[in-house]
Image (cartoon, rainbow, N blue to C red):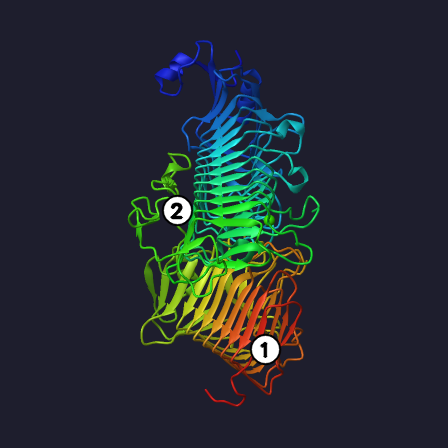
Amino acid sequence: MNRSFHPLPTLLLALCGLGAAAPAQAESFLVHSQEEYTAASKRVQAGDTIILANGTWEDFEVRFTGEGTADRPITLTAEEKGRVVLSGQSNLRLSGRHLVVSGLVFRNGHTATSEVVAFRTNKENLAFHSRVTEVVIDGFNNPERSETDFWVVMYGQHNRFDHNYLAGKSNNGVTMAVRLDSADSLENHHRIDHNFFGHRPVLGSNGGETLRIGTSRYSLEDSFTVVENNYFERCDGEVEIISSKSGGNVFRGNVFFESRGTLTLRHGNDNLVENNVFFGNGVDHTGGIRVINKRQTVRNNYLEGLTGSRFGSALTIMNGVPDSPINRYHQVEGALVRNNTLIDSEHIHLAAGSDAERSAVPIDSRFLENLVFNNDGRDPFSVFDDISGIEFDGNVANPVDAPALETGFRRSPVKLERSDSGLLYPVGDAFADIGVPRGLPVLSRNQTGPAWFTKPAQRREFGSGETRPVPDRADLARAVAGAGPGDVLQLTGRHYLAEKVLVIDKPLTLKAADGVRPVIEFERNTLFEIADGGSLRLEGLRISGGSAPDVAGNTLLRTSRYSMLNNYRLHLVDVEVVDLNVNHSFNVLTVSRSTFADEILIEDSTFQNVTGAVLELNRETDDLGLYNAEYVTVRNSEFEDIGEALMVVYRGGTDESTFGPHVLVSDNQLHRIGLSTRNRAGASMLLHGAQQTRIFGNRFEDSRGILIEHTVGEPRTRIEGNAFIGTPAPEVSGDPATVLDNTLAPGRDS
Ligand code: CA
């Protein structure tokens, strides 16, 4: 007997409560090291089990192979589920038949290969009739945000991925993919069920899908993958939550909670989308279902509170490209959209994407017995081309003045009430056959993921922790280091001097106590550095750069110089910033590449004598669709003598996979902005590739102009009600959707 591991009789294990009923000769191997695992893995036969001992397994690349049978699978599991952690450069590959893996946790590391869990050991050896269940992959990210890897990839056929927890994927690459890249992976009949797909933060480029099935290349093949009863919570990576790129798939009974983007039937035919529930709760860019290709069925889906538009609408039926190449848009033909309920959702777009290339309108399609109701009375429908190829019948919608669709709708007020399951239904049975059926099951969060794993609470908000007073002249670095996530450092004194860079690695607020306006000065070239995991809110403070070193390129705030996996938030509210001018190019915020802000907010604040820029968000210069911030908002603030730009925002590239950047600048007073000879932007604001821009109610005086470069997507820019005094008019270059209406009279005082 090999003494490096411990085969235990099944009977003994059964007595210990670890084994299941199995034939007497089945063996269990409890292993404590990678060497013991390797030895055991060479011996396992049908019915056997390998048990990883509790603890942390560092740099463990698990290869799990074997030939089990339906009655006697080969199992790899944990001594106690959840207490076996694979960290460092670890991953799992399995191939063979009737294999089961359960109970493992991937945390504190990343895969050195391109996959964390792969249903194959190499191109020749795939998994069949195998199952991965109750596995946790938690923030198991390559530390370099732009490096691509996938967390789970299914190959082979008849495999199941169920009751797993996947959350926090922050680097490039889809969270989970089903591949159809060989004959043995076609018509695979995989099941993906009862998984919890947790928060996937905005990636800020293409490649942030949560689930992709197939690729355009094999998209006319059938996959027959069933995606059932999964929970998608804030899966915000990019415009596609799910990208179905193959035929014969079923998406049933899933919940999409506050997830930006849509379930997209991107390529492939004969897919079924039914009994799903979408709750947008009014969150930006929450969408529903996008229909492309032939014979797609969309029925009994419930969609509420979705704000998305264009390709991200609650429901989108696309135009196609005549004789489309495999990777473009195939015409919609034979679609059935029936008995869906769409409530308080802003947009339903039909023949969407119609243009010179996408000219093939939907044909032979039906839109029947849907309930479309908006309490605010607005009409969600927009029609972009000939939709005579869609038959509308038996639908009910709220009355509107000039409906986009005339026939096939009964226009009626509908009184709605919320059922115990959380869905809104018409009161009474007048509309019983319209919309989703009564009693549509709504999956709950706790029906998904491993039963033993407690899903973490939502993110820590500013101010969610304790309030900690910081007395006059106290050591700020110590106070910052000692605070917990969500804490508020309440500055009760009048003066603070930071001798060290204050490194912010958790959500933290620095706030003036009532009745004081504390002054912070700093002696290093940076006051605050936002590190990975950090977010910062400053409130009621005065910050002076007067004690900063006399060198070029100081900055009040900076991000980590290294790739940051966690998106950050930065709030400056009621803050006075003065004298960032001891040398040239002294910025308020300087970012590094591979960092991404979910939100930057400047509000009710003043800035005086800054030799550099206020917000320099232009470090992703490879034109690959990356950028540095999703929402940039500056309002009700005053800026005076800012040498470089108020903001530079750069989003290069030509893909349309992102919703942002969004820029809002309103009700500010700006004097002498951007006049420094070092202002390479040549403007007071330079926005390149921003998707949504609103600039209104501002007064620009003796400043450089605003330059806006539309480069990709359908950018929307509104510049209204501003005064430009001694300042050139805004210049907008590139494509459409611009409103330039500066009605505020020059010289008007406000
Ligand atoms: Ca995509």
- The three-letter amino acid code for the residue at tag 1 is Thr
Question: Can residue 596 be seen at all in this image of the molecule?
Answer: no
Residue 669 tag number: none
Tell which of 569 and 494 is nearer to you: 569
Other residues around mark 2 within 10 Å, as few (<14) / some (14–19) / many (≥20): many
Mark 2 vs mark 1, foreground winner is: 2
At horizontal 66% and vertical 37% (from top left) the residue drawn is 218
Residue 434 tag number: 2
Residue 611 tag number: 1
Where is residue 121, by image quadrant? top right
Other residues around mark 1 within 10 Å, as few (<14) / some (14–19) / many (≥20): many
Tell which of 719 and 424 is nearer to you: 424
- The answer to whether 282 is drawn above or below residue 687 in the figure is above
- The answer to whether 358 is drawn above or below residue 716 in the figure is above
Q: x, y (%) of residue 157?
A: 58, 27
Tell which of 394 and 63 is nearer to you: 394
Task: Answer with left or right where residue 716 lies relative to residue 407.
Answer: right
Question: Can residue 294 be seen at all in this image of the molecule?
Answer: yes
- The answer to whether 403 is drawn above or below residue 685 in the figure is above
Helix, strand or loop status at disc 2 = loop
